[in-house]
Image: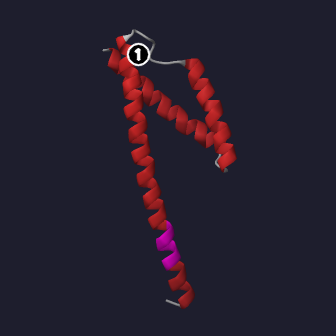
């Protein structure tokens, strides 16, 4: 391997280590988010509130699309991602109702 290839491989390994760390942060953040939404689901079930809140969901999607744009992330991807999470949360809230 040439020096430039060795440098490229070292740089690749540093990038991959950073990606691995970010993946861990994402998973821990999602776990914490779902702990909070499970608490919301229990509260909604206890007070006979609907499992979904379409108006809030619309506001969240719009807010996250703006955040994505500001961060240089594709807002369509961000919307797909949050929609997936919202659907999972609604399933959990429906299950909490029994």
Placement of 48 over or under 85, stated as above or below? above
Q: Which image quadrant is residue 49 in?
A: top left
Residue 26 is inside the magenta segment:
no
Placement of 17 over or under 37, stated as above or below? below
Colour style of the rendered protein structure: secondary structure
Seen at 48% across and 60% down, the residue is 19
Outermost residue, left direction? 98
Q: Which image quadrant is residue 51 in?
A: top left
User: Percent position (x, y) of residue 66?
Assistant: 68, 38
Outermost residue, top direction? 48
Seen at 44% across and 23% down, the residue is 90
Seen at 39% across and 21% down, the residue is 41
Q: Secondary structure at mark 1?
A: helix
Outermost residue, bottom direction? 2
User: Percent position (x, y) of residue 38?
Assistant: 37, 27
Q: Main secondary structure of the magenta part?
A: helix
Question: The magenta stretch spans which residues?
Answer: 10-15
User: Percent position (x, y) of residue 63?
Assistant: 64, 33
* Residue, disc 1: 44
Q: Which image quadrant is residue 98 in?
A: top left
């Amino acid at each position: 391997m040439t020096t430039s290839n060795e440098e490229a491989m070292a740089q690749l390994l540093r990038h991959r280590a950073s990606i691995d760390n970010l993946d861990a942060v994402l998973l821990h953040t999602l776990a914490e988010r779902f702990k909070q939404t499970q608490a919301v689901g229990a509260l909604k079930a206890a007070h006979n509130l609907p499992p979904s809140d379409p108006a809030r969901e619309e506001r969240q999607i719009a807010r996250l699309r703006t955040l994505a744009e500001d961060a240089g992330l594709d807002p369509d991807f961000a919307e797909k991602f949050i929609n997936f999470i919202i659907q999972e949360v609604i399933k959990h809230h429906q299950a909490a109702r029994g």
